[in-house]
Amino acid sequence: ILWKATIIQAMEYRVSFLFSILANFIDFTFGFLQYIVFFTAAKSIAGWNSDQILTLYGVFMCIFSLHFILLYPNLIEMGEMVNRGSLDLLLTKPVNSQLILSFKRISLEELGSFGASLALLTWLAGKGVLQLNIATVAQFISAMLGSMALVYSLFMILMSLAVKLEKLENMSQLMWSLFSFCRYPMEIYPGWLKHMFYTLFPIAFVSTVPASAILGRASIEITILGIIIALIAFAGSTFFWRHTIRAYTSAGG
């Protein structure tokens, strides 16, 4: 019902809505062309050839666009709900506040990027680039679920900060800065930084590991490690959210 309401609201300005989808498709296309330009000067990047890099780009854009479709609109609204007192009303209702606040609104403007990324992966599958057997597909799905859990965990931490600080601006820039490291394979980074991206700040599991899985490049151990880290991050972010809500003193202080 809530999603239907947001879609109806978006459809009030249909031309603007369609242009937003087109703009995101064009943004995807420019990113695609950027990778094509790279391979006019090199045959591979850190051991990844052009088709493998495009697979990474397709996976990255799938996850990135899903974040902006499902999660980002709710992060934007969080600060407003605190300031308006709407959060107080929700917390008094017999519903799961984390679930409602996480997925209350959706934005379909990123459908252009999401559809284009699926089309790219389908094209690569048709070329035989992707290893579509039971083992690699299962590993890929597991890695993607872990990736989305990591992204959701970061989202929940930012939601909690929005409640504590009451106003959290420039989230799109912050999220994009974090996501930008995932656009390229982890092998391009120095050893110490790559190690950090697999442990302390595990963004390697957002796009590099899922892409490596569907390409047949990832070991089962690294995929399992990613799932474990994702579960720990999810549990930690949920605990942080619940602690934030317990300490919340309402809009009036």
Image (cartoon, grey):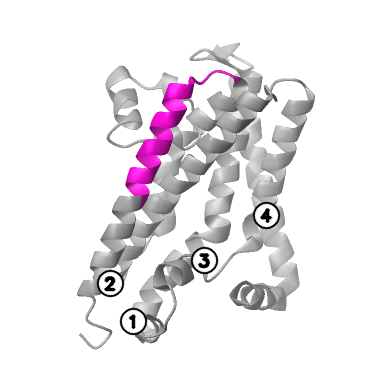
Is residue 204 something one can see in this rendering? no
| Crowd rating for badge 2 (residues with CA inside 10 Å; few <14, some 14–19, many 20+) | some
* Residue at which label 4 appears: 111
Q: Answer yes or no: do the residues labelled 2 and 3 have beta carbons within 8 Å? A: no
Q: CA distance from mark 4 to mark 2?
A: 33 Å
Tell me where the magenta segment starts and ends, as one range.
216-234
Nearest the eye: 131 or 19: 131
Per the image, label 2 sits on a secondary structure element best described as helix
Q: Earlier in the sequence, mark 3 or mark 1?
A: 1
Q: CA distance from mark 3 to mark 1?
A: 20 Å
Nearest the eye: 38 or 1: 1
Q: Earlier in the sequence, mark 1 or mark 2?
A: 1
The location of residue 23, given as percent across then percent down, is: 67, 54
Residue flagged by tag 2: what amino acid is it? Answer: Ile
Q: Answer yes or no: do the residues labelled 1 and 2 have beta carbons within 8 Å? A: no
Q: Earlier in the sequence, mark 1 or mark 4?
A: 1
Per the rendering, the mark at residue 245 is 2
* Residue at which label 3 appears: 103
Q: CA distance from mark 1 to mark 2?
A: 15 Å
Q: Closer to the camera: disc 1 or disc 2?
A: 2
Left or right placement of residue 222 versus residue 250 in this view: right
